[in-house]
Each structure stands twice: as C-alpha cells, then as structure tokens.
Image (cartoon, rainbow, N blue to C red):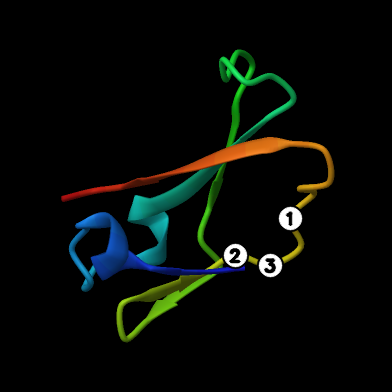
Amino acid sequence: MELDLSAIGANTNLPASDVKIGISNFANFTNTHWIEATSVINGIATFTGLPLHDKYFTFSAAQ
C-alpha cells in the first residue's frame, strides 16, 4: 500500500519510522496495532505485507 503524505497534510520528508498505519478489528480502533512504513521515497510512504482483510485502518505521521 502507498500513501502520498501530502494528501494527508504531512511533512513529505519524514523518515519511515515517523509514518505509521494503525490496524484494528474494531471500528472504534480499540486494540490498534501500529506498524511503521517500510519506506518513504519522494513523499510516498510504502507499507508492505499488511494484513488488511476485514480490518479497519488509519494513518499517523509526524508534522
């Protein structure tokens, strides 16, 4: 999965460790599991190997 950081108003020069995806089984995001981006290149964060089938997800990025 790729995320254009500018589309969410985040700093496009962030290291991968500052960009995360939160994955939960529940719409209210209880018990959310946070995973760092695999890479960030030219403002595009890449996440690989994510278990997203029947899951809810959101993103977090430092400003």
Tell me whether circle 1 and circle 3 mark residues in contact (CB < 8 Å).
yes
- The amino acid type found where label 2 is placed reads Phe
- Determine whether, in the image, residue 55 is placed left or right of residue 38: right
All told, the count of numbered labels is: 3
Residue 48 numbered mark, or none: 3
- The amino acid type found where label 3 is placed reads Thr
Q: Residue furthest right?
A: 53
Provide the secondary structure element on which disc 3 rests.
loop
Mark 2 neighbour class, 10 Å CA radius: few under 14, some 14 to 19, many 20 or more? some
Per the model, the C-alpha gap separating discs 2 and 3 is: 4 Å
Residue 47 numbered mark, or none: 2
> Quarter-wise, where is residue 24 in the image?
top right
Residue occupying image coordinates x 51% and y 61%: 37
- Determine whether, in the image, residue 38 is placed left or right of residue 62: right
Tell me whether circle 1 and circle 2 mark residues in contact (CB < 8 Å).
yes
- Determine whether, in the image, residue 31 is placed left or right of residue 41: right
Residue 62 numbered mark, or none: none
